[in-house]
């Protein structure tokens, strides 16, 4: 088993493990798309307890939400992702000040 770790900034680290890749694969979301969402300069973040949800557009224009669990302060494990439906994408785009979906 292997783990890849990506650093957003000095304060935040995102980690993928085998279960992450399996969950992303089952959802039809590549790890590259998940990473694009996590690194997007304009994204919606919701942090509730130990759960972090991040939504943004990928480079190919898909709107994706990524779910993570905080393992340690500012260290997150990717646990799932999914493509947003049209209404959800419109809502997130509006929150980001965008009119295009």
Image (tube, grey):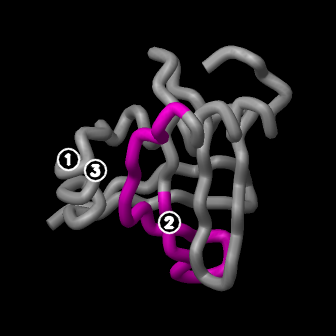
What residue is drawn where x is 61% and y is 20%?
101
In x, y percent, where is residue 4? 35, 54
Q: Tag 2, which secondary structure?
A: strand
The spot of residue 87 in percent (x, y) is 58, 37
Along the line of sight, the residue nearer the viewer: 30 or 12: 30
Q: Main secondary structure of the magenta part?
A: strand
- 94 vs 46, nearest the viewer: 94
Label 3 – label 1 distance at C-alpha: 4 Å
Which is nearer the N-term, disc 3 or disc 2?
Answer: 3
Residue range in magenta is 67-86
Labels 1 and 2: the sequence-earlier one:
1
Q: Position of residue 99 (x, y in %)?
A: 76, 18
Q: Is residue 97 left or right of residue 76?
A: right
Residue occupied by mark 2? 68
Classify 30 as above or below 72: above
Q: Residue furthest left?
A: 1
Q: Residue at x 51, y 18 (%)?
A: 61
The residue where tag 1 is placed is: 25
Q: Write down the quadrant of residue 33 in the picture.
A: top left
Q: Residue at x 61, y 67 (%)?
A: 52
Q: Is residue 100 above or below residue 69?
A: above
Q: Which residue is mark 3?
A: 24
In the rendered image, the residue lying farthest to the front is 87
Expressed as whole percent of the image width and height from the top left, the position of residue 16 reads: 36, 58
Q: Which numbered disc covers residue 65? A: none
Dot 2, how many residues are within 10 Å of its Cα: few (below 14), some (14-19), or many (20+)?
A: many
**What is the secondary structure assignment of the residue under circle 3?**
helix
């Amino acid at each position: 088993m292997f783990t890849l770790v990506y650093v957003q900034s000095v304060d935040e680290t995102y980690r993928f493990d085998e279960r992450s890749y399996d969950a992303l694969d089952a959802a039809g979301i590549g790890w590259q798309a998940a990473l694009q969402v996590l690194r997007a300069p304009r994204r919606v973040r919701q942090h509730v307890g130990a759960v972090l949800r991040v939504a943004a557009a990928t480079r190919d224009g898909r709107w994706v939400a990524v779910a993570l669990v905080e393992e340690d302060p500012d260290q997150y494990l990717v646990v799932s992702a999914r493509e947003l439906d049209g209404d959800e994408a419109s809502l997130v785009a509006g929150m980001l000040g965008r009119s295009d979906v």
